[in-house]
Amino acid sequence: MSATAAIPLPALHASHAGIWLREANGETRGVSKGEAINRAADTPVLMINAPLVASRLGYPDLNGLDLLELYAFIHPARFCVPTAKGLAQALDMEPPTGDDAVAEFLQRAATRLLQGCEQPDWAEREGAWSILQSLAKLRWPWAQVVAPHIARPAQAEKWLFSRLPEWEDAPERPQPKQVAMEEEAVAASLARLTGEGAERREGQRAYAQSAAQVFAPRERDARPHVLLAQAGTGIGKTLGYLAPAAHWAQESGGTVWVSTYTKNLQRQLRSESRRAWPDRRRDGSRPVVVRKGRENYLCLLNLEDALQGGFTGRPAILAQLVARWAAFSADGDMIGGDLPGWLGTLFRKRGITALTDQRGECIYAGCPHYRKCFIERSARASAQADLVIANHALVMINAARGRHQGQAPTRVVFDEGHHVFDAADSTFAAALTGQEAIELRRWIIGPERNARGRRRGLAARLADVASYDDAGGEAVEAAIEAAAALPSDGWNQRLIEGAPSGPVEALLGQVRSFTYARDESGAQDAGYGIETEIAQLDGPLVEAAQEAGVTLAAIRKPLMALGARLEAVLEDAPDWLDGQGRARIEGARHSLGWRVDLVAAWESLLARMGGPADPDFVDWFAVDRNDTREFDIGIHRRWLDPMKPFAKVVLEQAHGVMLTSATLTDRAATGDGGRIEDWPHAIARSGAPHIDLAPKTANAASPFDYAGRAEVLIVNDLKRGDLPALAGAYARLIEAAGGGTLGLFTAIKRLRAVHSRIADRLARAGLPLYAQHVDPIDTGTLTDIFRDDRAASLLGTDALRDGVDVPGESLRCVVMEAVPWPRPTILHRARRLAAADEPGGAKNYDDRIIRARLAQAFGRLIRSRDDAGHFVVLSSAFPSRLLSAFPEGTPVIRLTLDAALARVAAGPPTGKAPAAASEMQIDEKDMPY
Ligand code: SF4
């Protein structure tokens, strides 16, 4: 095959603008949905992203030769945006010129990929031939096409599990030296990071000096240095805190944790940290480590099981492609690491999940792959690192679990600090639900009888203790017997039928009918989840709670007894306990401890039924539903103020903690058009007052020219609830902007309805529209696609409001469908009520939430000095008191949709000609309050 000759297979492309089929002989024509489906059923056709094509054709069972699968096989662990344009970039080819040229491009791209396998310098050759043989047995559609292009290796290839390198044990790091940092040293460290000749930024220098304060030696036990630093976008905050962090780590020999909320920032930190640290130290260890929760990493034992028959059909093909990837992956991170985010969606999501250690079933040193395990490698590397990049939840969990072992993070920078409250809220939550209870059952008993695979229960994981130690064996048996009373497979169907089995299912059945009887949120008709407060309970429900409580206590007691036995075995090691057994028992002891805590939390939740409420907590019943089914039922508990446990668990044992963000404080209006940072609320939300600490504060204003480069347009002539008008407004705004628009919604239903009305129209105009909750693509990949195509637009909900970091031309316009009011949930009501006595009262509580959301959404628009664009809110009811959410000086214009379209069509503000003063006046006349 020559470089330009196309593979002799038909190719199919479907977008919202139409469907094209290219025959093997080179003719391209538009076809109907029916013809496309028939052709794909008759002959294997080339396509890109088969699930997306299937959803465009409205035919979920579509099969074909997906070029993304081929790419994942030939170039595992290599980044590729999963579109024709993205594939062209990854393969260094000219992208297709339009939708009608995609099918022809697919033929050329397939040819290029296959030719790559014939090149002697193919970087990912190792292992390909062997895995292809397995894929052929699994009838992977590509296998026959690929086979002629991959030569059989002269020597047999090593199996993945023998090829992966082993991690090495290292001695524990000594505690860090106490270091006082001089101003000059911090300035010099910053200068080193920003580079010779870099523009000297005073804001960044002052910020770095403030950040250095958290690394000072602590003066008293449980009294960490706490700094809250508001850092306007563009001041260079990352290098601002990395400078003192790097200097401190070098001088003290200690570890700094930087915690983020989004994967984007994690990626950015990884790359910025290269200015301060080399990739490897002289001894080969890594000074910077990205650390995630264990559920993110590939479990090699699960993979081995999947490869050896645990998975069948399409998931078995996925397992082979994951094995290809594992051999080339930098760290085995399956979620947001170098495994393409789209690979799971080409198969089915659960396939990826089943390859990670979701349920804590790890058997540690009992695992044949223990010495090569990605999770163990990452945990060991982080213990030796100068900088650990993690996320908020993991830092909190590590602080809680490492508390008694001296392994809790002690110097922590929480970047994206405005999310610490939400992360603490979910980390310290408790929920006794059907899903949670069945997980516990499986962890103790093992899988249900008809389940495939190697998953095992406590008895198998602790087989040696059970057989050598009588008391241990009895405890395992008692726990298994008691856990049989927990919900089992089919529990939710039994509840719907009113035939629960066992006391916990019986309780959940009562919770379900009680919630349906009491919920008045209106979500029932809309097909969303429903909830009700725990109050005025009837006798049967209280009795059911008591019985379930007895059941849980009967599970907790043998688990505690087992924990005590494991401790005794470790302390007084018997003959049968070798090094590996010890490591396994230590692992089991920790995971047992978390389970005991979990069950105790459930018991205390049940003990409260029928009794007085604990003022520290908000409890409620919920039935989680989507359009088609109920997926969980249970009892939920949140802290009224989750920063209370945060202060105890994280702050109290730390030496220095910094919370930083561009939106850490609320900005209230001063009356003369200015802004004032609301520090009292930011301080209260940091948790510091719970341990009687007064944190230091710092503020660095953004250097960006918001007044000249951004405009807030509040469209005031759209009728609320008029869906066709809303959809029309979105379509016209996207057309006026020429794409490059991020559309934010507060309800998934409205997002879907708008998307279905406008996607075809926009696609025909060459403006592709993607949407979260519509396209079968994960959010990270959607953002990659959006970033990659100047003409594309993206619709989404909360996750996009502050997870999208798209500097440059690809994002020129943000459109919000409405003022983002908080959802009036039971939890929100309780916190709102608690805020009633604060200055500004409950109303100000809501306003702060909305302003924070507006500020985050606005923050998507201007990511760099050269960015410019419009921020449009489609709401006539936009109270003026919320406008202080936007940076000072940003023009805010209330206008009709037509006037807004004219401004958007004229292009982003250039900073040269500010809008006429009269237009910038805020028209307050008809504003509702
Ligand atoms: S050590 Fe645990 S997580 Fe690692 S591969 Fe083995 S079972 Fe999986």
Image (cartoon, grey):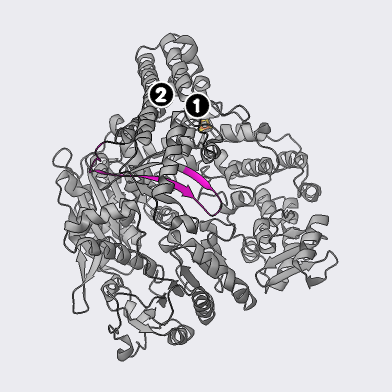
Q: What residue type is labelled 1?
A: Ile
- Does the beta carbon at disc 1 come under 8 Å from ligand 1? yes
Judging by the rendered image, the residue that carries numbered circle 1 is: 363
Q: Say which quadrant the C terminus sits in.
A: bottom left
Instruction: Please tell me whether residue 896 is drawn above or below residue 373 in the rendered image.
Output: below
Picture quarter containing residue 220? top left
- Residue count near mark 2 (Cα–Cα under 10 Å), binned few <14, some 14–19, many ≥20: many
Q: Residue 437, how many percent across, how many down?
A: 45, 34
Residue reaching furthest to the right? 25
Report if residue 624 lies within the magenta region: yes
- Does the beta carbon at disc 2 come under 8 Å from ligand 1? no
Q: Residue 149, how many percent across, how many down?
A: 78, 50
Residue 866 in view, yes or no: yes
Instruction: First in sequence, mark 1 or 2: give its number.
Output: 1
**Mark 1 or mark 2, which is nearer to you?**
2
Residue beneath the point at 32% across and 36% down: 605
Query: In terms of secondary structure, where does tag 2 sit?
Result: helix
Instruction: Please tell me whether residue 698 is drawn above or below residue 570 in the rendered image.
Output: below
Nearer the observer, 25 or 244: 25
Left or right: where does residue 867 sit relative to residue 118?
Answer: left
Nearer the observer, 801 or 446: 446
Instruction: Please tell me whether residue 198 is drawn above or below residue 827 in the rendered image.
Output: below
Q: Say which quadrant the N terminus sits in.
A: bottom right
Magenta-colored span: 610-632
Residue 386 in view, yes or no: no
Residue 607 numbered tag: none
Q: Which amino acid does label 2 sit on?
A: Ile
Judging by the rendered image, the residue that carries numbered circle 2 is: 555
Q: Residue 475, how many percent across, how many down?
A: 42, 16
Report if residue 367 lies within the magenta region: no
Query: In terms of secondary structure, where does tag 1 sit?
Result: loop
